[in-house]
Image (cartoon, rainbow, N blue to C red):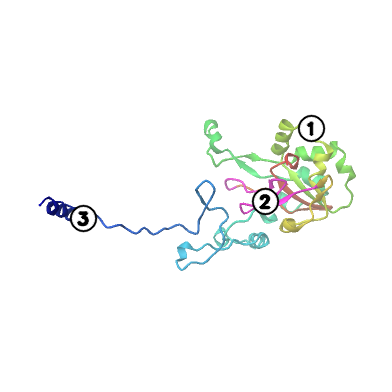
Amino acid sequence: MKLFLSAALVTGACAFTAPNAVRVSTALNQKLGSGGMADTRDPEAFADEDPRKSISAAPSFEEYLKQRDAGASSAEIAAPAAAAPAAAAPAAASGGGGGDILGTVKDLQGPGQVWGDLGIAEGFEENDLKGYENFGKFAAALESTGVAAELGAGPYTVFAPTDPTLESYETLRGEITADIVKMHIVPGKIASADIPTANLESLAGPLVYRYAVRKHFVNDAIIGEKTFGPYDDYPMDVECSNGIIHSVGLCFGFY
């Protein structure tokens, strides 16, 4: 009798037990890293039957520059690359004016920076223009170190650091020497689109190029860096009589 009652109770309990549900993973080709977290960095392009799960290929560095030069809208660019063309530079700087490297650097207008959250206390909106980061300190260093006088007809490629960039270096590392200045000058004329494959041997030694997080770096400085807000980005491909200038937001001496 007891055996019969036990069997009846087990059978009744099973009737109210929910069936095991089959869970379908929605992860999109994710791999688990050493910490057990899904690794989503730099995913490979692939096409899935479900278009929502597909990942399109980003344009190459050169393709992106050509799209920007042609006036392509952001909607037409699948994934922004790092470098910006001359068309993105301020109108006052994009032409270069035909002067030499020193004269062009002196007059070059840098990227426009917004106030951000610091502007609230000063009565500004976060997106209001705070000012432009220009290149007076680099121009002064070119002259004071004698490097400008050593430059001939060229051509040269100059990676010009902004004033705040050199101020940071002076605060953290010390004096801007001739070697630091020469580190930003490469013999030959190299357009921004050609930087990934160019011989980056500066007047002070080799520079290091790398591509990471869909950006292009030279000595850890972003090439074609963008600014926040609607103002001008870091000027690139600025022509001058004895070369070309690309601006950077990090002193190469930090590398």
Q: Residue visible at 52% across and 62% down?
A: 55
- What residue sits right under mark 3 in the picture? 14
Q: Which residues are magenta?
A: 206-230
Where residue 242 appears, as percent x and y from the top left, is 84, 52
For the image, the number of numbered tags is 3
The numbered disc on residue 175 is 1
Side of 23 where 65 appears, left or right: right
The first of marks 2 and 1 along the sequence is: 1
- What residue sits right under mark 2 in the picture? 224
| SS state under label 1 | loop
Q: CA distance from mark 2 to mark 1?
A: 26 Å
Where residue 38 appears, as percent x and y from the top left, is 50, 51
Pick out the residue farthest to the bottom: 49
Q: Nearer the viewer, residue 8 or 186?
A: 8
Q: Are marks 3 and 2 in contact (CB under 8 Å)?
A: no
- Quadrant for the C terminus in the image: top right
The first of marks 3 and 2 along the sequence is: 3
Q: Nearer the viewer, residue 34 or 50?
A: 34
Where residue 106 appears, as percent x and y from the top left, is 78, 42
Mark 2: few, some, or many residues within 10 Å (few <14, many ≥20)? many
Q: Residue visible at 58% across and 63% down?
A: 57
Side of 37 where 101 appears, left or right: right
The first of marks 1 and 3 along the sequence is: 3
Identity, as a three-letter code, of the amino acid under mark 2 = Gly
